[in-house]
Image (tube, coloured by chain):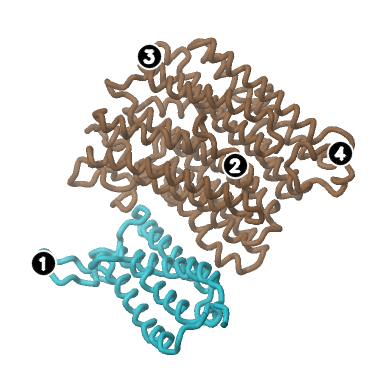
Chain colours: A cyan, B brown
Amino acid sequence: MKMTKIVRTTADVFYPFCLVFGLYVVIHGHLTPGGGFQGGAVMATGAALLIVAHAYEDITGRIRKTAMKILEAIGLLTFLFAGLSGILFHRPFMANWMAQTGKLFGNTVAHGPNPGDLNTAGLLPLLNVGVGIEVLGGLTVILLYMLSGIKEEKKP
Amino acid sequence: MMDTFVMRHLPALLIATPLFAAFLMPLVGNAGRTVRSAWVFLGALLTSAIGLALAWKVLATGTVLYVFGAATTQQALPPDAAFPIRIMFQVDALSALMAVIVSLSSLGITIYSLAAESKQSGLETFYAMLFLLIAGVLGMVVTGDLFNFFVFLEISSLAGAALVAYRVDDGVAVEAGLKYALLSTVGALAVLTAIGILFAQYNALNLASLAARLQFTALDKVALVLLAVPLAMKCGAVPMHFWTPDTYTTAPSSVTAFLVVSSQASLYALFRILFTLYGHLVQFSWATFGWFLIVLGVLSMFIGVTMAIPQKDVKRLMAYHAVSQTGYMLLGVGVGLAVLGNAEALKTYGKTAMAGGLFHIINHAMYKGLLFLTAGAIFLRTGTRNLNRLGGLGHTMPWTMVFFMIGALAIAGVPPFNGFASKLLIYESVFRFSPFLSIIAMVVSILTLASFVKVFHSMFLGPPRAEFAEAREVPAPMFIGMALLALFVVVAGLMPQPFIDHLISPAVDALVDRSGYIAAILGGR
């Protein structure tokens, strides 16, 4: 079921903004409300917008189930390897070896009120990114399966 | 050897390995059947090896502690605080016993499923779910954190429900899966409420830390009920057994065999909560809660077996027998709990009863798994589970018949199989506690034997039937899976003493030794 051209064009314009906002929520997970799951859900909303505006058949070329399943796996593996990376540095599983090293995400958090530094928290942003990718893939697959059942409206 | 890199991180790898196998499955699934099967086999083999290595380490060196995200794996308490704040795995001898059970049966079941499920579609999802289920059950038995336990309980419940509903070709499987998912969710919500009640009062989620602080207020009693009832339901004790027949019948046989193990993880949690969390409080009446387990056990034993006798569906019949056998474990450990305050009685027969109950857990996982696998083999070759339609299969499937005989004799407690070893321990010790209970246990065993003689007769004996002329012996992976479990049944039956000395007795001591469990975390504090 295809919507009018106005709706379709608006959805196409909105889609990248949805993704960008979702990425913002993911990457700022350790500073602002939200995080991996919420950001991933926002990104999946973009996919939902496209599916609703266009017909399901037209959209499967742009958003593929297999690609989304692979994204889901990649997200989960990112999370797992972020946990396992602690072991490689002779710390326990999930140890935050990246925090306060001065390198990537390694700044020390300033005391007192401050605007927030994105480059802090060590392993946590990586975990958020992993969860974000996983939720984007997983939720989109769910949406594709659920919306594939929408029936074509009968022409009068 | 003891302090190599892998040995140090065994508890984390125990969960990470099946999760890795599950997460990579969607990618591996695209690479073709052979690669996927090899990956599944490798994942199961590694998981089992890690589980057994962890159990060996625990039995050799004592409780293994693993603190996630800390400076070292052994730092249970943060440098500036007197209470544990991190998630930790605390693997004592009882957890090690459960890890052995999960390792052995998951290996046999996964190998079996490689051939049994090969004709189905959506297999990468199936194996991803199977590995998630294994990870969830392993997590349940090794975690030392109550909220972490809830998370693993949910993982195993959801993966289990998805696997039960895996064969969607008839609506029955979906109904059973939905039932399992609904009941598990309601049960898990009750567990979560109880955890919330305990956390609100004591600001702790760590089991050892909670056990040290528990005051047994009125709220704690509510929490105990909210923990004990869902866990008793998840292990299929009468009168909360109603989900077992539907779920066990419709799930693929390899999954059913592992759901038995999953239900025993809930049994482990029930024992852990009654003994470790609520065990030694002054106000705690051991006899009351011991009799709670005993009554559940006797009801399960008797109602399970009497419901099993009239069944026509072989897997439904076995499901009711699973309920019945769970009763033995509850009875054995219940007697131990009832005499926990009486040092003399505990020493003379209480520990023996508990050893019987715990030994029965591992024996049951093996022979009941084996029986479900043989039922799956017969379903694969004949396409029916109806006992009235089956017959004469002994001519065409002799090895399946042998495996079924081993499993059936073990479940009925006939020597020299492992069911006899654990049941004898239970009979002898429970007789000292109450002769009446012991007699009930024996009667139930006789009824079990009668029931399985009927099943054996109607499936394997008689002239070969024309409609099953196509039936032949199972493929090699299914044979190997069943042979693994059958091997344990025979070995543990012929030589039970090494198992009892090195695996079961340490587990019993760990279950009774509440202060040791607490001291492993809190040290002298």
Contact? badges 2 and 3 (CB < 8 Å): no
Foreground: B59 or B205?
Answer: B205
Please give the label number shown on residue B246: 2
* Tag 3 and tag 1 share a subunit: no
Q: Residue at x 32, y 34 (%)?
A: B223
Q: Nearer the viewer, mark 4 or mark 3?
A: 4
Q: Nearer the viewer, mark 3 or mark 1?
A: 1
Marks counted in the figure total 4
Which picture quadrant has residue B401?
A: top right
Q: Amino acid at mark 4?
A: His
Q: Nearer the viewer, mark 1 or mark 2?
A: 2
Gap between marks 4 and 2 measured at Cα: 31 Å
Gap between marks 3 and 1 measured at Cα: 60 Å
* Tag 2 and tag 3 share a subunit: yes
What residue is shown with label 3? B343
- A68 over B330 or under it: above or below: below
Circle 3: element type: helix
Circle 4: element type: loop
- Farthest residue to the left: give it: A112
What residue is shown with label 4? B395
Q: Is residue A14 left or right of residue B479?
A: left
Instruction: Give the mark, 2 or 3, whose residue is nearer the N terminus.
Output: 2
Foreground: A112 or A51?
Answer: A51
Contact? badges 3 and 1 (CB < 8 Å): no
Q: Chain of mark 4?
A: B
Q: Is residue B381 left or right of residue B518?
A: right
Q: Residue at x 37, y 13 (%)?
A: B342
Q: Residue at x 48, y 69 (%)?
A: A143
What residue is shown with label 1? A113
Which picture quadrant has residue B394?
A: top right
